[in-house]
Amino acid sequence: MEFVVRAWSAQARLGSLHLGATGPQLETPCLLLLTRKGLPAFIPPDLFHKLHPDALALQVSPLHFLDSPPPEVVAEVGGLHKMLCLPEHGLVAVGRDSIMDEADGEGTTKLGASFKTSFGRRIVGPVKYMEVINACKPNLWASLPDEVPAWVSEKRNRMSVGRTLQWLDHCLSLSTDMGCLGVVVGGSSVEQRTHSAQQTATRNVAGFSLGGFGLGEAAEDRGPLLEAVTASLPMEKPRHVSGLGMPEEVLQAVAAGVDLFDSTYPHMLTMGGYAMTFPATMEDILGGFANKNLAVEEWSKSDSDSAKICLRSVSFRLDESPLVDGCKCYTCRKHSRAYIHHLLNTHEMLAQTLLDIHNMYHYLGFFQAIREAIRANDFPVFHNQFISHRRQSTLLLSSQ
Amino acid sequence: SPAMALRFEVLARHNRARASRLTLPHFECETPLFMPVGTQGTIKGLAGDQLEDLGCQIILGNTYHLALRPGAELLEKMGGLHQFMNWPRALLTDSGGFQMVSLLHLADITEEGVTFQSPVDGKPMLLTPEESIQIQNKIGADIIMALDDVVKTTTEGPRVEEAMHRTLRWIDRCIAAHSRPKEQNLFGIVQGGLDPRLRDLCIKGLVERNLPGYAIGGLAGGEEKDAFWRVVAQCTAGLPEDKPRYVMGVGYPLDIVVCSALGADMYDCVYPTRTGRFGTALVPEGLLKLKHAAMAKDYRPLDSSCSCMVCSRYTRAYLHTIVTKEAMGCQLISYHNVAYMMQLSRNLHKSILEGRFPEFVQTFLKKQFPSGDVPEWVQSAMEVAGIDISMCCYPYPQGIKKQMTTTGL
Ligand SMILES: [Zn+2]
Ligand SMILES: [Zn+2]
């Protein structure tokens, strides 16, 4: 793995991350696409390969490879790249099943972390965890964390920091490969976060994964926490964050110098029958948003807002336009809102496939815009414009 | 003669079997061909580009479902089903009658049409032959089907005769109601149950109407296989040589091979996609149940002779872990199963064209029945089709063989 920071805009940074000899070259900030058992949930491989030029990196969950398939089967095939037939894609293993599970810190003992999986609650210790990681051979893997939500006691929070470090050392000792992202925790305590970051930075890791976010902390506390962590980390190594996936959260973390993201946001929208419509190009965001997306009366009628439209709404029954005018994704080039509304209405699986294609494409475009803004050294303006537009449209909507 | 919106050219024959070119308004098809069923304007879990990649030529839509959602008026407003689902190739719609009779318990057939309880508000509704055609004219498929009087294949007695006569009376109402004969082809459906006399009467009546194509209806409903193939053989022999022949609801690979040998051209069935959703893959040897524990450590593709996107990428071991659990499992197995059916269609067409149809049938049967236990009905059908499959079957006692040849049809 090779990582180079190429440009800064305030604390936000533009980097390039090369994931090994056969891995892709990623431009950061970068979105890792969500998977179920290693593949995108609804987008079959032939369509996935045509999705977007940036659809090169996937987040995989080691928890999906505990039992079915078990690590020995993955190892026998020669790792996940082979099993999934994604030889040139970047695979980043993160010990969180973002769809199924949110860490609650309950049930975790010194023996291992507790996860709610589709097979029920499982305790996974460093040994089992590394058996899976070593079988999967991902390009990067986050160490096993003891993640706790923001509201736990100080004592429990301290314990989480100590245990996460201890497990990091254990994981590293069992690793057959480099490419470890050491997990930084510390809940809502700046002091613990800083301590966790400083200690993790002393280990032989390729980069860092910021854990324990998106677990109940207030949005206004998050900025300072993120900044405290990144300030304590070496600049030349990549930083990943887990659990921050909404556009505003992504911008907040980019502003603090985070490089890699996994996000359930596109998936959640797809499951709800929504399509992303928020402005996602630098031109649209910095241009003060052309008014094309500001049909507030329309939103309230159709359970939509400035960020998304709900295709379940009958108001799209006869709508022959694509999800987003001018969008170049497969779905928008090929199908109308009316057709997708019909597919949702008749519970046809193709609805999720088409929505997910658009939502991933749109979000990858948003990350492209973030990188452009950093390259142009315009990121703070870009960030502010985006947030103020969102605020403005939320106000408009609530006044309806 | 009435307007037709198709051209049908037989390119090659082997006895009764034929390889043809069927030119429809939206696509030039090669037969024999299998039509995947896209009930509500989509083949479950497959995108349009994938269906084109797989070589699908005609997709079937169900009029009953489409009329309920999104509705015929909406489809007409949106420029027809082709444009609504953005499918550039050919479409076929059924009449809606069969779906009503099979899905709704309270359907009742009178001379006027099929009465049924609306699934939306419970009110009694009536589907007449005229209405079925009007709806299908709005949907705009390349091939539309006449409303027929459907009885269960297992029904016997005067009801079968009544249904056959009514089907003939209704075909004239369908023809009269058909408003787009230059863009859509109305196919008539041969009824008559398992009674050769009734089937013959129906064929005669329909052929007099000189329709663009004919379907063989009332089969694949649980009748004995021996009765099934005899009806197909009788109908294909009686229907005109220069018109396409469509066996409705038939989709098991073995049935398609047998019917093609007997001179049928078109097939449809939900089976490949439905069985895929339940984790069963179609392979030359028969069926592969991916949920089976033996698959957990099987590192082979579904079918080593298949070059589809799924077989070239995934092992059975991986598919085993996602079938029936993840949406992707269902999508991938359905994809392969449709690929299998399309490959079967191409193989039938090519082998007839290249004069090696018997060899194709023999290889197919040897794979499906490696121990030689080819069912008797297949053996009898192949004898009528004039295809020697003796090398695929273990030797029969002399007595049975003799009896078979003397009974004939
Ligand atoms: Zn799009
Ligand atoms: Zn295949």
Image: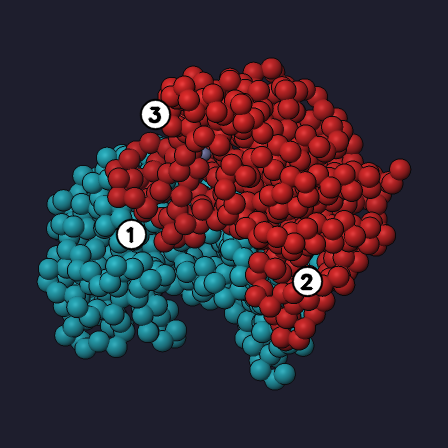
What color was chain B assigned in the picture? red
Q: Amino acid at mark 2?
A: Ile
Q: Label 1 is found on which chain of the structure?
A: A
Relative horizontal placement of residue B204, taking residue A182 as reference (left or right) = right
Please tell me which residue lies in front, A30 or B363.
Answer: B363
Q: Who's the residue at 21% across and 69% down the image?
A: A105
Q: Earlier in the sequence, mark 3 or mark 2?
A: 2
Q: Residues within 10 Å of mark 3 (few under 14, many from 20)?
A: few
Residue type, mark 1 in image: His
Numbered disc 2: secondary structure: strand
Image point (65%, 54%), residue name: B158
| Residue at which label 3 appears | B371
Q: Are marks 3 and 2 on the same chain?
A: yes
- The amino acid at mark 3 is Ser
Quarter holding residue B77: bottom right
Per the rendering, the mark at residue B109 is: 2
According to the colouring, which chain is cyan? A
**Where residue A64 is drawn, which disc sits there?**
1
Determine whether the residue tagged by mark 3 lies in a helix, strand or loop: loop
> Is B310 placed above or below B166 here?
above
Q: Secondary structure at mark 1?
A: helix
* Mark 1 to mark 2 CA distance (whole Å): 53 Å
Mark 1 is surrounded, within 10 Å at the Cα level, by few (under 14), some (14 to 19) or many (20 or more) other residues, namely many
Q: Are marks 1 and 2 on the same chain?
A: no
Tag count in the figure? Answer: 3
Can you tell which of label 1 and label 2 is closer to the viewer? 2
Quadrant into which the C terminus of chain B falls:
top right
* Mark 2, other Cα within 10 Å: few <14 / some 14–19 / many ≥20: some
Q: Quadrant of the N terminus of chain B?
A: top right
Task: Using the numbered discs, state the Cα–Cα distance from disc 3 to disc 2 in whole angstroms.
Answer: 47 Å
Q: What residue sits 70% from the left and 54% below the top?
A: B162
Which residue appears at 36% of the width and 76% of the height?
Answer: A218
